[in-house]
Image: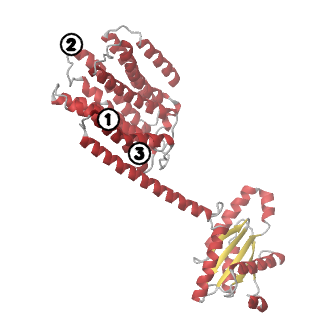
Amino acid sequence: MSKLFAVAAALAIAVYQVLPDNPWWVSGWQMTIGYAGVAAILVGARRLPRRDRLPWWCFAAGVAANVTGIGVSVLGEALFQWADLPTPSDPFFLLLYPFCAAGIAVLIRRRESGRNWTAMVDATTITTGLGLLAWVYVIAPAAHGGEISMLGEATQVAYPIGDLIMIAMMTRLLRGGGRRGAPFWWVTGSLAAFLVGDVAWVVVGNLGDLGFDVESHLPVTRGIDSVFLAAFVLFGIGALHPDARLLGAPAGAAVAGLGRVHLVLMTLASLIAPALLAVQLATGEVTNGMAIVIGSATLFLLVVTRMAQLLREVERQAQQVRELARQDDLTGLPNRRAWNDELPRALEHARRDGRPVAVALLDLDRFKTFNDTYGHPAGDRLLKSASAAWHGSLRAADTLARYGGEEFVVLLPGAEGDEARDVLGRALAATPLGQTFSAGVAVWDGQETSDQLIERADLALYEAKAGGRNQIREAANRPAAAAARK
């Protein structure tokens, strides 16, 4: 249905280019296309679950108000000669901004589970830069025009302010998380079309002030009108798309990355203030000095804030990398790298405190046979469940790590041989799926290195396997001659 509507809308916009230059024909055609866009939004929203309809209703209300403003404007000018600002049509035109902003706000809220401060800073930076540009060339001149009433000036200023609100909300939506399917781009395309149309009219008006009567050329005005007509129907195309129900689907909290396009946009936004100052210095008169100062300071603080966010993110990722480098991917236990760092520290603590410490090597019995029989995924599940069961059977002070393959290692601080065997016996009894392990235990003699301690435990492990598996063997003490050579 969305494709059919898109084709019909494209044909209607194409026909609009050749309509007679009659205000009733022109406005009637514009309103027909606009209300068709509203109807498409409502039809698409009706097909969605009730909870997902609110943002589309907001978009429909904004477009409907804007389209109604066209009719009010034509009738007011034809019947009552309402031409000076404000006219009764301006409230209808201006309602587009709060309704669309509300719809975007609902989408952002539903697409993200938490506050995305990085996206907010990026959106504020871009909006501040463009806001300063709008202030210098649109808002300030309109507010001090002196040719219309104060209410007319306020109405004229409200349009660029509404555009800035739309820019802020659209940038925030683009910098946030969530699914980016076709409906997402139809919606953002519609918002962008409204902004392009408004900017085009500002440019045409400024050219007219400079003596270039561009507005009297029919192709120019029809072209700008077509941008707004496209904005009306793009919302409808998005609403009718089959994936419209996924537009507000939550995607969890996401960190807004800083890609090349985003970096370029933020750089350009940050350079607007000095560029404006350079232009005014070149003309010999700085007329917006205070605005440029405030804009520059705001942009500087926003850039510093973004840099701080990036540094924190880099530190967080570096910490994650460090943790992952010391953690076994499958079981979540400390890996061999972490064990090699931990054991020397544990031996040093035992030496300083005068307390015993034992080390045990565990090896799942006949693990290769289990893997060949049930497959590698089952073998992985066995390793995960076994490590979890053993971890729950150990004491709180003990450390279980994966040494490699189906082999694990246990650090038992404060344990002599008997206590170490008791603890490992509980772990052996807890081994899941009817499996067993063989283990070798070595109690530190207070002199040997960590490698020598592990070597004795490994020898005891081989004795346990040679003795029939499913048992725990304690390593013999080092020979006195070996200790003396040490």
Q: For the residue carrying disc 3, how many other residues have a C-alpha within 10 Å: few (<14), some (14-19), or many (20+)?
A: many
Compared with 485, 217 (above or below) is above
Which residue type does callout 1 highlight? Answer: Val
The disc, 1 or 2, on the residue closer to the chain's N-terminal end is 2
Q: Which numbered disc covers residue 87?
A: none
Disc 1 from disc 2: Cα separation:
45 Å
Q: Is residue 134 left or right of residue 9?
A: left
Judged left or right of residue 160, residue 232 is right
The secondary element bearing badge 1 is classed as: helix
Image quadrant in which you'd find residue 351: bottom right
Horizontally, residue 156 falls left or right of residue 442, namely: left
At which x and y percent is residue 133? 32, 36
Q: In this view, does 340 lie above or below 170?
A: below
Residue 126 is at least partly visible in this image = no
Q: Distance between the residues labelled 3 and 1?
A: 26 Å
Q: Name the residue under label 2.
A: 79
Which callout, 3 or 1, points to the residue nearer the camera?
Answer: 1
Q: Which residue is drawn at 66% across and 60% down?
A: 330
Residue 122's disc is 3
| The disc label shown at residue 279, or none | 1
For the residue carrying disc 2, how many other residues have a C-alpha within 10 Å: few (<14), some (14-19), or many (20+)? Answer: few
Q: Residue at x 46, y 37 (%)?
A: 49
- Secondary structure under the numbered disc 2 in the rendered image: helix
| Residue 274 position in % (x across, y down) | 34, 41
Q: Label 3 sits on what residue type? A: Asp
Q: Which of marks 3 and 1 is nearer the N terminus?
A: 3
In the picture shown, does residue 126 fall above or below 83? below
Q: Locate residue 71: give its quadrant.
A: top left
Q: Which residue is drawn at 70% across and 77% down?
A: 360
